[in-house]
Image: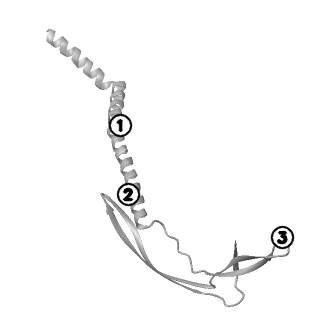
């Protein structure tokens, strides 16, 4: 008889727990908190890998040569200018540079991507073969004037 009463108490407790919304919400909250631990571990691993990848890309591109800028041909011609000094008795010689830009510019390029590996990371680098052609005007060009005093 006593065993039946204990069973009834356990059954009643089991029934009240299984039907309690509060208990279910608390159980879900505990499971969510426990699942946040592996999630933060995975997030830390992803962050570390991203940092290593950026460092690897930076290292390989520094060894390869970094970013490049291609500019067309310029023709720079030095010339002398004589300027009267403040005492107006002597002339000061100054060297200036006339820079001529091409009227027509043709750039042909062949760019070949190459894949470099470092550890688990892959980095794409590029090789380029360039051919630059420019035509300069022979009379009345636009001149960019740079002064270099002696």
Residue 97 at what x, y percent from top left? 67, 78
Quadrant location of the C terminus in the rendered image: bottom right
**Front position among marks 1 and 3:** 3
Q: Quadrant of residue 58?
A: bottom left
Verify CB contact (< 8 Å) between mark 1 and mark 3. no
Relative vertical location of residue 58 with respect to residue 21 in this rendering, above or below: below
Residue 38 placement, left or right of 9? right
Quadrant location of the N terminus in the rendered image: top left
**Within-10-Å neighbours for mark 2: few <14, some 14–19, many 20+:** some
**Within-10-Å neighbours for mark 3: few <14, some 14–19, many 20+:** few
**Within-10-Å neighbours for mark 1: few <14, some 14–19, many 20+:** few
Q: Earlier in the sequence, mark 1 or mark 2?
A: 1
Relative vertical location of residue 75 with respect to residue 5 in this rendering, above or below: below
Between 13 and 27, the one nearer to me in the picture: 27
**Front position among marks 2 and 3:** 3
| Measured Cα–Cα span from mark 2 to mark 3 | 60 Å
**Front position among marks 1 and 2:** 2
Residue 111 placement, left or right of 97? left
| Measured Cα–Cα span from mark 1 to mark 2 | 30 Å
Residue 10 at what x, y percent from top left? 22, 17
Q: Which residue is mark 1?
A: 36
Between 78 and 19, the one nearer to me in the picture: 78
Q: Secondary structure at mark 1?
A: helix
For this orientation, the residue located farthest to the front is 89
Mark on residue 86? 3
Q: Secondary structure at mark 3?
A: loop
Q: Earlier in the sequence, mark 1 or mark 3?
A: 1
Q: Which residue is mark 2?
A: 56
Colour option used: one colour
Residue 51 placement, left or right of 6? right
Residue 14 at what x, y percent from top left? 25, 21
| Measured Cα–Cα span from mark 1 to mark 3 | 80 Å
């Amino acid at each position: 008889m006593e065993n039946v009463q204990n069973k009834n108490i356990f059954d009643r407790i089991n029934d009240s727990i299984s039907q309690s919304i509060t208990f279910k919400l608390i159980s879900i909250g505990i499971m969510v908190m426990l699942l946040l631990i592996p999630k933060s571990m995975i997030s830390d691993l992803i962050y570390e890998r991203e940092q290593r990848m950026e460092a690897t890309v930076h290292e390989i591109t520094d060894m390869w040569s970094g970013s490049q800028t291609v500019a067309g041909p310029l023709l720079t011609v030095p010339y002398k200018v004589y300027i009267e000094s403040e005492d107006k008795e002597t002339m000061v010689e100054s060297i200036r540079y006339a820079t001529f830009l091409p009227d027509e510019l043709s750039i042909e390029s062949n760019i070949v991507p190459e894949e470099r590996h470092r550890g688990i990371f892959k980095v794409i680098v590029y090789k380029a073969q360039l051919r630059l052609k420019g035509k300069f005007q022979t009379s009345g060009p636009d001149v960019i004037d740079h002064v270099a005093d002696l």
